[in-house]
Image (tube, helix red, strand yellow):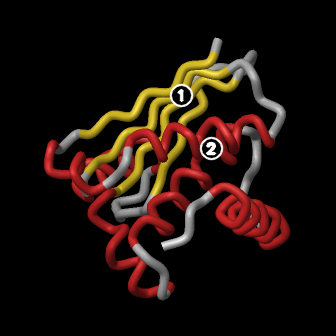
């Protein structure tokens, strides 16, 4: 099965991204990771929602940029929650455009669903290199 859903918890976010570009990005990353059986939801949420998730599932009372939940051990099935409120600030901090930071967070979430971890420095470096590679090869530059 090949299924990707793009959802928003706030309608004001819809005008700020191109759904077809995000679907294309997700498909290309999954294809590059040799994943053909997937059911994924990318959900754009506000900071309060992500704080609640972080508190409920990770016992952290702080905001974060992206949280992924893998819902199956047999296939790539999961949810990626992207904190839409933080993208603009992070883009400014990293000196990139909004679109690039948005896509980086989605790629990061997809890599987690694909089995990558970033708890240790070495793991984080591998994920960052993958994110950079996919942004270069898939993303349209701003």
Residue sitting nearer the eye, 50 or 24: 24
Residue 91 image offset from top left, x and y in percent: 42, 78
Left/right placement of residue 67 relative to residue 133 reads left
Left/right placement of residue 22 relative to residue 125 reads left
Residue at horizontal 60 percent and vertical 31 percent from the top? 70
Residue at horizontal 37 percent and vertical 48 percent from the top? 18
Left/right placement of residue 27 relative to residue 8 reads right
Label 1: element kind: strand
Above or below for 33 versus 117: above
Above or below for 66 versus 71: below
Residue sitting nearer the eye, 64 or 91: 91
User: Residues at badges 2 and 1 in contact (C-beta under 8 Å)?
Assistant: yes
Residue 40 image offset from top left, x and y in percent: 53, 28
Q: In which quarter of the image is residue 139?
A: bottom right
Residue at horizontal 17 percent and vertical 44 percent from the top? 10
* Numbered badge on residue 110: 2
Left/right placement of residue 53 relative to residue 11 reads right
Q: Quadrant of residue 61?
A: bottom left
Dot 2, how many residues are within 10 Å of its Cα: few (below 14), some (14-19), or many (20+)? many
Q: Residue under circle 1? A: 40
Q: Quadrant of residue 138?
A: bottom right
- Count of numbered badges drawn on the protein: 2
Of the two numbered discs 2 and 1 on the same chain, state the one appearing first in sequence. Answer: 1
Q: Quadrant of the N terminus?
A: top right
Residue at horizontal 26 percent and vertical 58 percent from the top? 47
Label 2: element kind: helix
Residue 132 image offset from top left, x and y in percent: 71, 68
Dot 1, how many residues are within 10 Å of its Cα: few (below 14), some (14-19), or many (20+)? many
Q: Distance between the residues labelled 2 and 1?
A: 9 Å
* Numbered badge on residue 108: none
Residue sitting nearer the eye, 93 or 62: 93
């Amino acid at each position: 099965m090949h299924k990707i859903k793009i959802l928003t918890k706030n309608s004001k976010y819809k005008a700020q991204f191109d759904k077809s570009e995000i679907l294309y990005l997700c498909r290309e990353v999954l294809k590059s990771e040799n994943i053909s059986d997937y059911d994924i939801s990318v959900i754009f949420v506000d900071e309060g929602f992500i704080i609640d998730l972080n508190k409920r599932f990770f016992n952290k009372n702080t905001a974060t940029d992206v949280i992924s939940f893998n819902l199956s051990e047999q296939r790539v099935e999961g949810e990626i929650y992207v904190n839409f409120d933080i993208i603009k600030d992070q883009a400014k901090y990293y000196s990139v455009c909004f679109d690039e930071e948005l896509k980086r967070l989605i790629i990061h979430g997809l890599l987690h669903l694909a089995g990558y971890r970033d708890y240790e420095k070495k793991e984080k470096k591998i994920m960052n290199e993958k994110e950079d590679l996919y942004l270069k090869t898939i993303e349209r530059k701003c």
